[in-house]
Image (cartoon, helix red, strand yellow):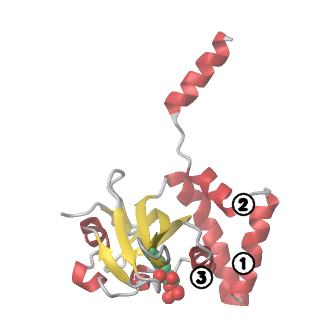
Amino acid sequence: MALQTNNTSGNIELDRVKCILSTTDLKGNIKYSNRYFSEVSGYSKDELHGSPHNIIRHPDMPKVIFKLMWDRLKNNENVIMIVKNRAKDGNYYWVKTFFEIKYHPKTKEPNGYLAILHAAPKKAIREIEPLYKRLRNIESRYGIHASQDYLIRYLMKDDKTYDEYIHEITQEKNLVIDFLKIMKELAS
Ligand SMILES: Cc1cc2nc3c(=O)[nH]c(=O)nc-3n(C[C@H](O)[C@H](O)[C@H](O)COP(=O)(O)O)c2cc1C
């Protein structure tokens, strides 16, 4: 199935209803991928399975974001991130990704990871793209410690945790709820 691409920019428009799924081992090597992953990325299941997940890494993604992701997973915490991925043909797609830890049913030890990817809300992309650009610039000049410091200060300035920040920028406006709130206020 042909995917809709904005040819001038290379942005792949994702279906807002479908999700991309993958699982990996503890090192991030892909073990399972769903059909939509192949449709969007342009890689076949055979190409994906056994490959490290950075096969779709986009060079615009700051290293510090993946460091944060791995630190959280190794600390037994799930995490949500906004990620720009690169398809095989060089086009890109923005996703809101839920990274989750998988546990062995008997030993209860972590035995891999699961990623659930949806189209990232436009508001989140508008917010995070300039931040990622700054982080990349800092990283290329001064290294990952400097970009990590910048990210911490960026969140501290609004007194937010990383999770609160992601929650805020990914919240989609619900016009129905807003309308009902206004009606309630008017009636009181
Ligand atoms: C379950 C899971 C899903 C991942 N999904 C992505 C992804 O969609 N895009 C991506 O660039 N990295 C993803 N990663 C992270 C990669 O494994 C890797 O850390 C990242 O691409 C940075 O690569 P690098 O260390 O070679 O720079 C995922 C990792 C896991 C465990």
- Residue matched to label 3: 63
Quadrant for the N terminus in the image? bottom left
The image shows residue 5, relative to residue 65, as above or below, that is above
Please name whichever residue, 183 or 13, is drawn nearer the observer in this view of the structure: 183
Q: Amino acid at mark 3?
A: Lys
54 vs 113, nearest the viewer: 113
Where is residue 25 drawn, in percent x and y? Answer: 41, 82
Query: Does 74 sit left or right of 25 as displayed?
Result: right
Q: Residue at x 60, y 75 (%)?
A: 65
Q: Position of residue 166 (x, y in %)?
A: 61, 58
- Residue ID for mark 1: 148
Disc 3 and disc 2 in contact, CB within 8 angstroms: no
Q: Looking at the picture, which amino acid does disc 1 mark?
A: Gln
- In the rendered view, does 139 fall on the left or right side of 170? right
Up the image or down, 119 lies above or below 150; here it is above
Q: CA distance from mark 1 to mark 3?
A: 9 Å
| Front residue (pair 177, 91) | 177
Q: Secondary structure at mark 3?
A: helix
The count of marks equals 3
Q: Work out which residue is located at the far top of the displayed protein and give it.
A: 187
On the image, numbered disc 2 is attached to which residue?
A: 161
Q: Nearer the viewer, mark 1 or mark 2?
A: 2
Left or right, 63 with respect to 150, comes to: left
Residue occupying image coordinates x 72% and y 71%:
151
